[in-house]
Image (cartoon, grey):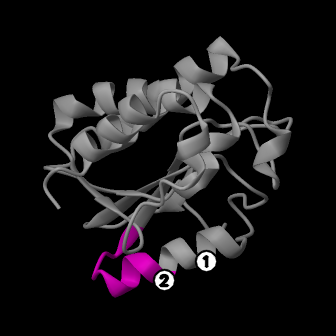
Amino acid sequence: MMFDIHDGEENDRERYVLGSSGANNLFVVGVNPGKANEDESDTTITKVGKFATNLKCDGFVMLHIYPQRATNPDKLHPNPIGKLVGKNAKVICSQVQGERQPQIRAAWGDLICCRNYLWDCLSSIVEKLNQFDPIWKQCGNQISWTVHLIQPGLHTRKSFAASIFSGI
């Protein structure tokens, strides 16, 4: 087994978490899972592992805004499935629980715009994680807002994301 932290459905249509445990874990939140599983990595998971190593973390936990597997985010469900959203939030909280001020890296980029419901899912996750006093940081140098300019709710979404990263 390549990854000792994993939770996915037997039908391989959803994955809630994937990672390698350590004493100092890096938590990363992406939009949705790709092909990786407990036995095999993919490009994203390989990058996350290297990123964690560069940050002197000896483990990482990959989490997602929405747990449906899709190598192309445009193939995500057109509307969220409530039981997936609920289980995802529970799994995320169970992974972060017990960590003292967990480091959480935002790795969703503009892909969050591929489905309007992803913002609601993210908002719910952030609200539930606040009880753990997380330290949010973005992956990369800046968040691009180009795609958001043509979307309704720009100010609300930008303000929401800015509030997550207000400590940067």
Identify which residue is drawn at 27% across, 82% down. Answer: 56
Looking at the image, is 141 positioned above or below residue 32? Answer: below
Residue 140 appears in the rendering: yes
Q: Secondary structure at mark 1?
A: helix
Residue that mark 1 sits on: 46
Determine whether 22 is above or below 166 in the image.
below
Q: Residue furthest bottom?
A: 54
- The amino acid beneath tag 2 is Lys
Q: Which residue is mark 2?
A: 50
Q: Within the image, what quadrant is residue 65 found in?
A: top right
Find out whether the residues at labels 2 and 1 contact each other: C-beta distance under 8 Å.
yes
- Residue bounds of the magenta highlight: 50-59
Where disc 2 sits, the SS reads helix
Would you say residue 55 sits in the magenta stretch? yes
Question: What x and y, as percent, mark residue 155?
Answer: 38, 33
Residue type (three-letter) at the residue carrying disc 1: Thr
Sort mark 2 into few (<14), some (14-19) or many (20+) by Cα contacts within 10 Å: few
Residue at 20% across, 46% down: 134
